[in-house]
Image (spheres, grey):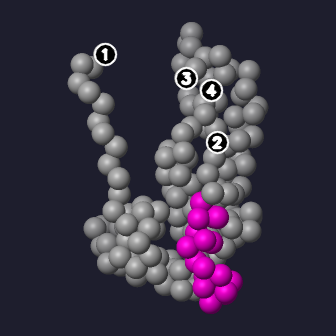
């Protein structure tokens, strides 16, 4: 076991327009090849699109989408006695939020459509309404954890 102390958690900076750390986390995950300004453009265009379509605050739609996609449990592969078991484990909120952002972006990238801003806006609106591919991914993870509940004692 390591004698070094645990690394302290870094708190992300808020983004310039909405002054929200969640938006900045999303921008950092959209980021490709170090083009942060393009990631900001994509997110802000999608937020504008959400505001036009739903007539609601886009930040509240984003929060609701992430809250609905965030999983409570996940499965982790664990080798015991020569066989591998999918062991369900509860995950903390920071890890759950990171998974939710990853799933939302993955689902929006796979969507057919014109550009990433529109695809992201539609996926966020779908997730806020409790449907879409990211929600399906969460439900699939929960089903897998429920099916493998018998192996929970291997934690």
Q: Disc 3 on helix, strand or loop?
A: strand
Question: x, y (%) of residue 136?
Answer: 71, 55
Q: Say whether marks 3 and 4 touch (CB < 8 Å).
A: yes
User: Could you give the CA–CA distance between mark 2 and mark 1, rounded to whole angstroms?
Assistant: 29 Å
Q: Quadrant of residue 6?
A: top left
Closer to viewer: mark 2 or mark 3: 2
The local crowd at label 1, few if under 14, some if 14 to 19, many if 20 or more residues have their Cα within 10 Å, is few
Q: Nearer the viewer, residue 51 or 99?
A: 51
| Residue linked to disc 4 | 87
| Region in magenta | 50-66
| Residue linked to disc 1 | 1
| Residue linked to disc 3 | 78
Q: Is residue 129 above or below residue 78?
A: below
The answer to whether residue 115 is seen in the rendering is: no
Q: Say whether marks 4 and 2 touch (CB < 8 Å).
A: no
| Residue linked to disc 2 | 72
Tell me which label, 2 or 3, sits earlier in the chain.
2
Q: Assign the magenta stretch its main secondary structure.
A: helix
Q: Disc 1 on helix, strand or loop?
A: loop
User: Could you give the CA–CA distance between mark 1 and mark 4, rounded to whole angstroms?
Assistant: 23 Å
User: Could you give the CA–CA distance between mark 4 and mark 2, rounded to whole angstroms?
Assistant: 14 Å
Tell me which label, 4 or 2, sits earlier in the chain.
2
């Amino acid at each position: 076991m390591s004698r070094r102390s645990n690394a302290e958690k870094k708190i992300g900076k808020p983004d310039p327009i909405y002054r929200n750390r969640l938006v900045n986390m999303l921008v950092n995950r959209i980021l490709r090849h170090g083009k942060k300004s393009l990631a900001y453009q994509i997110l802000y265009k999608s937020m504008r699109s959400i505001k036009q379509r739903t007539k609601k605050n886009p930040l509240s739609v984003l929060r609701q989408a992430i809250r609905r996609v965030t999983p409570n449990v996940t499965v982790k592969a664990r080798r015991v006695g020569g066989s591998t078991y999918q062991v369900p484990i509860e995950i903390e909120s920071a890890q759950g939020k990171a998974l939710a952002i990853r799933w939302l972006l993955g689902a929006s990238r796979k969507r057919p459509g014109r550009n990433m801003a529109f695809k992201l806006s539609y996926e966020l609106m779908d997730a806020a309404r409790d449907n879409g591919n990211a929600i399906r991914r969460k439900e699939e993870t929960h089903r897998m954890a429920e099916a493998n509940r018998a192996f929970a004692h291997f934690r």
